[in-house]
Image (cartoon, coloured by chain):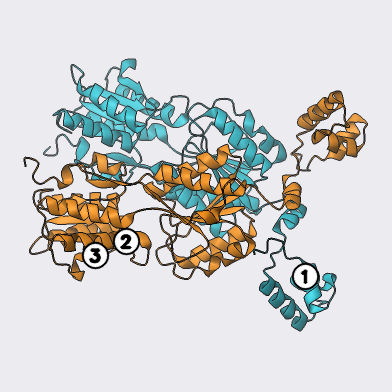
Chain colours: A orange, B cyan
Amino acid sequence: MKDTREVTIYDIARQLHISPATVSRGLNNHPAVSKKTRQKILEVAQALGYRSNTFASNLRRQHTNTLGVIVPKLNSHFVSSVLAGIEKVANEAGYNLIISQSLESAQKEVANANTMFKSRVDGLIVSLAFDTQDLSHFNPFFKKGIPVIFFDRVEQSLPSSTHIIIDNEKAGYQATEHLIQQGCRHILHITGNLTRNVYADRLKGYQEALKAYGLPFHETDVIVSMLDEKSAWETGRQIANMHPLPDGLFVANDTFAAICMQALKEKGIRVPDDIAIVGFNDDLVSRVVEPPLTTVHYPGQEMGELVARHLINHLQGTVPLTHTHTIIIHSELIVRQSSLRNPQR
Amino acid sequence: MKDTREVTIYDIARQLHISPATVSRGLNNHPAVSKKTRQKILEVAQALGYRSNTFASNLRRQHTNTLGVIVPKLNSHFVSSVLAGIEKVANEAGYNLIISQSLESAQKEVANANTMFKSRVDGLIVSLAFDTQDLSHFNPFFKKGIPVIFFDRVEQSLPSSTHIIIDNEKAGYQATEHLIQQGCRHILHITGNLTRNVYADRLKGYQEALKAYGLPFHETDVIVSMLDEKSAWETGRQIANMHPLPDGLFVANDTFAAICMQALKEKGIRVPDDIAIVGFNDDLVSRVVEPPLTTVHYPGQEMGELVARHLINHLQGTVPLTHTHTIIIHSELIVRQSSLRNPQR
């Protein structure tokens, strides 16, 4: 038989032949209760399996020590790195995480935000879905003064929230410039939904670099994709059949780039000699493919730690969020063999 | 100015000039309140930003619609696939997830379990840390009748809990047998902490296969590793320097296998001709390395969905957990080029 009834201070009081009020004071270290009695109360509480009524006390204190996290999808190397960073800092600070995924759907993101609001999270951490445009589902949080921090996929038009991002435009510029400097003259850019800052900004960087080096920009050179594994194989095979072949690819994530590379190689196309490739994120996959992939180092774990620390500092009253609207963390182009066309130069 | 004060039924009552009791009945669809009045109450409640006091009502109902999940680390392809599956099912059934990571430390796992217990999760899902041996940190759950489901990394000696696993021994046997059939005669096995069922069982399968084919087992052929990226590069380079070289590797995860393969290739060792390699998990990385990696398909997302569905069915009273102690889900050897030494035969 399981004892599913909750142990209360009355049970402890009965066993010790003292008043429930004394038990309550003892559990809260009230000085009116002698050290010896407090010790006894704790022993009996532990023996009976008493747990303080966190709910009731949260209800009084109006906070839950819980942070909500909404990500586009859990099953992503970048997202799981960020989550690992958030969890580490939150756990150390005594916060629980409630985590949900929008599965790249604005509609599901709305439902997730509602659930988080009803669960009374103390703060919310969000990376937006592909197609989220209207952000009114976060209004209940803003109205209540519950802090919301956006990372990576953000909407900077939003005035009263904090964004933690990398400089995607600069990263896109550097990646494209590197391909141009390796002799590429016809560079495709493969990216995600351009509604999102991360993809829009990388595209901007790509365009700026072409312009700076006097290369024409063709809209048909930009391939917008769902960035899933299936699309990657299809896109790779599609590129292999192009006449003439492009000579450079700048791809918005490493997984997609690695699969494209594999698909191209299967068709006998040499990387980097025929097509040079640059990915994005510095995922593990970029280091184990052949040739190793040039990429933009994007520190997910560090970003997660920063996001959580920032939010918790705010909740603990040490740093007001309103002073910092956007935090840009460092990213860096890492050059490997997949793009080095003229190593001898 | 943010309005941080919580909106109550009294605010709604005041605005509508009706009693708080009527508001409360109206919000609960009590038939004593006319449809028209109910409608008005809902409109004002929405306009003021009222949220029903989930906490207070959870306190009464003694459940929280929250599931706790403790995993060894969030930053893993397999774990993030499982989490994606758990979240999908939980979210659809109206459950929140509280997620934490033990970072492969039994000590942190104990702290995580305590936090989950205090947060009054309705059920707990656990994959054990490398070095967890004593399981008494789950006793408070068992004592209270809170269901605990273990997946992947389990401790089957535990009588009163459910385990969802694959047949690791069989998978280990098949992987090793395949290498033997490809002509390998000196096969190393690289694995994680042998306290854990997943690694112990795969080793058993490896030993069984050697025995079945009359090959000797040497303890020195088993390399136990933390299975992190750094160890993988080191182990790969160490194997490259062995005299004589082994001719087969059976590695407990794909990431580790992919890095080993890369490290061997950098030393001029040919895969599969000099050393044939089999990994484990069927991670994306196994499909993009050169040559593609033979591996054991291990359906993370499906496992996560099954775990969550099983736990929620139990919580909703449709399936008692006690009837099913261990569920074994299907896994399968997927043969690719990294181990095909005699494709012409």
In the rendered image, the quadrant that contains the C terminus of chain B is: top left
Say whether residue A302 is left or right of residue B96: left
Q: Residue at x 58, y 63 (%)?
A: A142
Say whether residue A178 is left or right of residue A115: left
In the rendered image, the quadrant that contains the N terminus of chain B is: bottom right
* Residues marked 2 and 1 touching at CB (< 8 Å): no
Residue A25 appears at what percent x and percent y?
A: 85, 36
To which residue does mark 3 refer?
A223
To which residue does mark 2 refer?
A201
Say whether residue A15 is left or right of residue A324: right
| Mark 2 on the same chain as mark 1 | no
Three-letter amino acid code at disc 3? Ile
Output the chain of dot 3. Answer: A
To which residue does mark 1 refer?
B11
Secondary-structure class at tag 1: helix
- Dividing the picture into quadrants, the one containing residue A154 is bottom left
